[in-house]
């Protein structure tokens, strides 16, 4: 995948996460550089950002760090094989 395609796919994934957060009325904001900061009711924070150099989306949460790579159809965790949106739903309680 070239750089343009990576950014399009990653931006689409972040927009989908944003839409679900808005629907669930969960506090979040986009910080400088397109970093998505999600503030949960228990005081913890989840950070989601693009890592263009390695063409991944990274998620940092209290439960650990996750790296997602495009597999041709969806963003999959490089270690567990779980899909990005499934994990995000679990992490934020959707």
Image: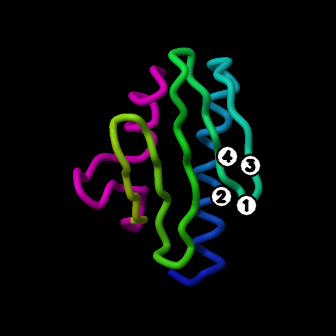
> What residue is pinned by disc 2?
11
- Magenta includes 85? yes
- The answer to the question of whether label 1 and label 3 lie on touching residues, with beta carbons closer than 8 A, is yes
> Observer-nearest residue: 87 or 33?
33
> What residue is pinned by disc 3?
31
Which residue is situated farthest in the front direction here?
A: 43
Q: Nearer the viewer, mark 1 or mark 2?
A: 1
- Measured in 3D between alpha carbons, the distance from the residue under mark 1 to the one under mark 2, in whole angstroms, is 12 Å
Q: Secondary structure at mark 2?
A: helix
What residue do we see at 63% from left, 54% from top? Answer: 12
What residue do we see at 73% from left, 38% from top? Answer: 29
Spot occupied by residue 86 in the image (x, y as percentages of width and height): 39, 37
**50, above or below 61, in the image:** below
What residue do we see at 56% from left, 15% from top? Answer: 41
Q: Nearer the viewer, mark 3 or mark 4?
A: 3
- Measured in 3D between alpha carbons, the distance from the residue under mark 4 to the one under mark 1, in whole angstroms, is 14 Å
Which residue is situated farthest in the bottom direction here?
A: 2
**1, above or below 28, in the image:** below
- The answer to the question of whether label 3 and label 2 lie on touching residues, with beta carbons closer than 8 A, is no
- Measured in 3D between alpha carbons, the distance from the residue under mark 2 to the one under mark 4, in whole angstroms, is 6 Å
- The answer to the question of whether label 2 and label 4 lie on touching residues, with beta carbons closer than 8 A, is yes
Spot occupied by residue 36 in the image (x, y as percentages of width and height): 65, 45
Question: Is 18 left, or right, of 88 in this rendering?
Answer: right
Which segment did they paint magenta? 71-94
- The answer to the question of whether label 4 and label 1 lie on touching residues, with beta carbons closer than 8 A, is no
Spot occupied by residue 24 in the image (x, y as percentages of width and height): 62, 19
Q: Secondary structure at mark 3?
A: strand
> What residue is pinned by disc 1?
33
């Amino acid at each position: 995948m070239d750089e343009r395609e990576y950014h399009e796919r990653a931006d689409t994934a972040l927009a989908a996460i944003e839409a679900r957060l808005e629907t669930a009325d969960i506090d979040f904001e986009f910080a400088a550089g397109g970093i998505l900061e999600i503030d949960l009711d228990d005081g913890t924070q989840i950070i989601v950002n693009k890592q263009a150099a390695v063409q991944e989306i990274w998620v940092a949460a209290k439960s650990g760090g996750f790296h997602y790579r495009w597999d041709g159809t969806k963003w999959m965790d490089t270690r567990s094989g779980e899909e990005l949106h499934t994990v995000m739903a679990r992490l934020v309680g959707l």
